[in-house]
Image (spheres, grey):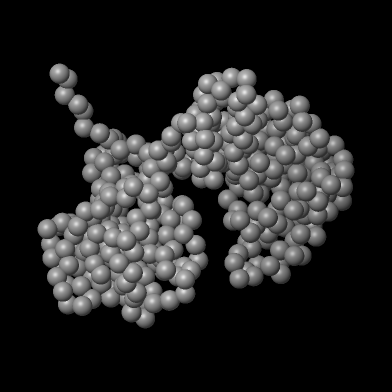
Amino acid sequence: MFLSRLQRTKMMLRFLAVVCGVALTGCPIGLVDAEDSLAEALAAVKSVGPNGLGNASAVQAMKTLNSATIDQVPMMLEAMDGANQLSLNWLRSAVLSVVGRGGELPRDAVAAFFHDTSHSSMGRLLAFDLLTDGMPELASEMIPKLIDDPSMPLRYKAVSALIRNAETMLSSDPPAAIGKLGYALTKARDVAQIQSIAEKLDGLGVKVNLQEQMGFLNTWHLVGTFDNKDMSGFEVAYGPEEAVGMIDLNATYKDQNGMDATWREVTTDHATGNVDLNSFIGKVKGATVYAFGNFKAAEDRNAEIRIGTANATKIWLNGELVMANEIYHNSNSIDKFTGKVHLNKGDNQILIKVCQNEQTESWAQDWQFQIRICDETGKPIAESKPPTQSQ
C-alpha cells in the first residue's frame, strides 16, 4: 500500500516541479530523490528472510533508514504493513534510531496511522509508544479504549490495565473486583493472560472452565497405532488418511503389528483440552495415530484452527489438508501452529495425524495434541447447539 501512495506522491512532486519550472537540482526533485532512496531502503529491509536471506542488502539499507528525517517516520511505519517478523525488528530499530536523534514528531500523521486499524499490529503498537512516550496521562486515557482493538499487543495493554484496576478494588469491593476480572477474561486473547485471570478468579472462589473459555475441543475418536519407525510414516497415507473426507467410524484397519485397529471415542478433562496419547494409546515409539472430530458451525465463516503439540502433525478439514508440520519435540505450547480455514454451516470434519518418533530422552516423551477453533483474534467460535424443545 505504501508504495502506491509513494508513487502518487512522487508523480505529483515531479508534476509540480515541471509546472513551476523548478530545476532538477531544486528542492522538489531533491525531495523526490530522498523519497526514492528511502523507499528502496525500506523494500530492501522488507526482503529480509530466514537463514540470512537479504541480510547484506538490508545492512546497507539500514544506513539510509537510520539517517532518515523524523518527518519520514510515518512512511517508515507504513512499511511495517505486510512485513515478516525479522523485517519488523529491523524497521522498528530504524524508527527508534530516527526518533532518538530528536526533532518534532509529526504527531498528526503518526496518530492517523495508529487509528487506522488496517495497519500492521506491530506498526500500530510502535506508533502508540511514540505518541505516549513521556506522556503517561495520554497513555492512561488511550489504553481503556483499546479493549476491543484487533491488535493483540494493544488489546493486551487494555486488559492488563483492567486487571490492575480490579486488583485495587479487591480489599474494598470484592464483588466489583470479581466482576471486572470476569469482564477482562471475556476480552483477553493472550493465552498467558487468560490463564492468569482464571487463576486470580479461582483464588477468589470463581471457577473458570478454560476448555469452554478458550474453545478447546475435548471429544475425539482415535485409531492406531500405525508405523512411524525412522520417521517414515509422516508421508504414508494409512487407512484413515486414504478415506479423508469420508471417514467411517465403523471401519477396521491393520495397525503396525498387523492387528485390527478400530476407532474409539475419548474425552479429555484436561483444563486446556490436552489429549494425552500416552494415556489413551500407550507410550508407543515410532508410531502414528489418527484422531477424528467434528465441529458444528452455526454459519459459513472464516476461522482459524490452532494446535498445540510436541509431535509431527497433519490436519485435514472437510477432506482438505490445511496444515502439515513435521517437527518433533521443540515445544508443546498452546496455539503452536495456526491454519486459516473456512467453516461450513453445520458439520465440519477434522482429521488429525499425530506422529511420535523414537527418541527416548525424558523431554521427548510427550505425545499429545490440543485443538481449538477461533477467529483471527483468538476468540473461540462457539459450536452450534441443537435447539431445546419447549416444555
Q: Residue furthest bottom?
A: 230
Q: Nearer the viewer, residue 271 or 300?
A: 271
Q: Nearer the viewer, residue 90 or 383?
A: 383
Q: Is residue 59 above or below residue 68?
A: below
Left or right, residue 31 beside residue 371: right
Q: Is residue 113 above or below residue 99?
A: above
Q: Position of residue 26 (x, y in %)?
A: 87, 47
Task: Kindly identify the residue that appears in the image at 76 percent across and 48 percent down.
Answer: 95
Q: Position of residue 198 (x, y in %)?
A: 49, 38
Q: Nearer the viewer, residue 367 or 137?
A: 367
Task: Kindly identify the residue that appears in the image at 75 percent across and 39 percent down.
Answer: 130
Viewer can see residue 91: yes
Quarter of image, res 208 = top left
Left or right, residue 47 beside residue 307: right
Quarter of image, res 212 = top left
Task: Kindly identify the residue that appears in the image at 76 percent across and 53 percent down.
Answer: 94
Q: Is residue 165 above or below residue 265?
A: above
Q: Position of residue 34 (x, y in %)?
A: 79, 51
Q: Position of residue 294 (x, y in %)?
A: 25, 48
On-image quarter of the N terminus: top right
Q: Is residue 134 above or below residue 247?
A: above
